[in-house]
Image: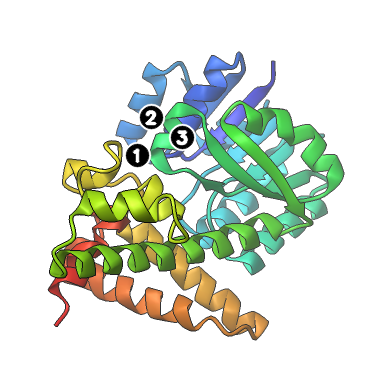
């Protein structure tokens, strides 16, 4: 059993911390939002009085925070108070450069670290079926892999510092683009008089097959578990997709990579969010496709 300090107990962090409890670990958690602490406490998390108090005795420190600046602020505040030999794992989705800065701060403090963003959304966090894309040294990965396995189904060591964030950004650029493509296909099918089920039955077993279609179909019916059947209640909100697409474009600019479809997808989700739909599931983009002239 490990003693784990968990900072960030929101929609993703709370269920992840709960799965650590179920795996037999002790978790001291903290979040600035009182309702997140209350929900986590109901799952067995010991709520600390501060982030510092949550990590002082921890063997493993996990952070799940909104943006890169929050991660750097957290590391700056917490690293001097961490237990000697502890491992810091950041599961936030942030830019590659900031992830590397966080690794460097941990290294300077004499601590090991991993960047380990996730894929799978809130449903995967609750079910413990997340995919972790991990960057960091072999030594750090060796220490962290079993902990991550308590929260996820697939753990992939992608390379050195920042590699996990690079993999997450690339993966979600594919996801954003593919959801728009699937949505356009269903809207075209509607206009051609083809039923949703007929298109799904063909495309899901043909060359158009992809995760956005078979697991997260943007129309009600073919995939009962998809948000389309619950009025697009978010499993992965459009605002989060936009965040990841923006990160992809920042990374593409810094790396000198051409991502024309990634840029177009970013523009489409920016318009969708600006129209007030940032809180809807990202698959609700089909409604924007239908409304397009």
Q: Nearer the viewer, residue 60 or 32?
A: 60
State the CA–CA distance, disc 2 to disc 3. 17 Å
Q: Residue at x 37, y 53 (%)?
A: 213
Q: Is residue 36 left or right of residue 149?
A: left
Vertical order, 126 against 269 (above or below):
above
Q: Which mark is residue 125?
A: 3
Residue at mark 1 = 33
Q: Nearer the viewer, residue 192 or 80?
A: 192
Q: Residue at x 57, y 46 (%)?
A: 91
Q: Which mark is residue 238?
A: none
The x, y position of residue 22, in whole percent, is: 53, 16
How many neighbours does mark 2 have within 10 angstroms: few (below 14), some (14-19), or many (20 or more)?
Answer: many
Q: Nearer the viewer, residue 197 or 169?
A: 197
State the CA–CA distance, disc 1 to disc 2. 7 Å
Residue at mark 2 = 37
Q: Nearer the viewer, residue 119 or 105?
A: 119
Q: Residue at x 62, y 18 (%)?
A: 25
- Label 1 with label 2: CB-CB less than 8 Å: yes
Q: Is residue 94 left or right of residue 191?
A: right
User: In this orientation, does residue 48 appear?
Assistant: no
Q: Quadrant of residue 254?
A: bottom right
The x, y position of residue 114, in whole percent, is: 71, 47
Q: Residue at x 63, y 50 (%)?
A: 75
């Amino acid at each position: 059993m490990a003693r784990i300090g968990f900072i960030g107990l929101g929609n993703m962090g709370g269920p992840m911390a709960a799965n650590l409890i179920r795996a037999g670990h002790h978790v001291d958690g903290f979040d600035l939002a009182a309702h997140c602490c209350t929900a986590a406490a109901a799952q067995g998390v010991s709520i600390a009085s501060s982030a510092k108090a949550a990590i002082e005795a921890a063997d493993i420190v996990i952070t799940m925070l909104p943006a890169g600046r929050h991660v750097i602020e957290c590391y700056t505040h917490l690293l001097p108070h961490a237990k000697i030999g502890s491992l810091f794992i950041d599961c936030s989705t942030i830019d590659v450069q900031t992830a590397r800065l966080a690794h460097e701060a941990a290294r300077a403090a004499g601590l090991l670290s991993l960047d380990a963003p996730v894929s799978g959304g809130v449903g995967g966090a609750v079910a413990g079926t997340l995919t972790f894309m991990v960057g960091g040294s072999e030594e750090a990965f060796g220490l962290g892999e079993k902990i991550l396995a308590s929260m996820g189904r697939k753990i992939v060591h992608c390379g050195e510092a920042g590699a996990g964030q690079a993999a997450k950004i690339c993966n979600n650029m594919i996801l954003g683009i593919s959801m728009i493509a699937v949505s356009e296909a269903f809207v075209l099918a509607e206009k051609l008089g083809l039923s949703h089920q007929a298109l799904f039955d063909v495309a899901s077993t043909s060359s158009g097959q992809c995760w956005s279609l078979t697991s997260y179909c943007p129309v009600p019916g073919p995939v009962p578990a998809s948000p389309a059947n619950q009025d697009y209640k978010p499993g992965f909100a459009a605002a989060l997709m936009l965040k990841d697409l923006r990160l992809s474009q920042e990374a593409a600019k810094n790396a000198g990579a051409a991502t024309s479809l990634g840029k177009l997808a970013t523009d489409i989700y920016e318009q969708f969010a600006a129209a007030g739909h940032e809180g809807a599931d990202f698959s609700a983009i089909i409604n924007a496709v239908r409304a397009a002239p």
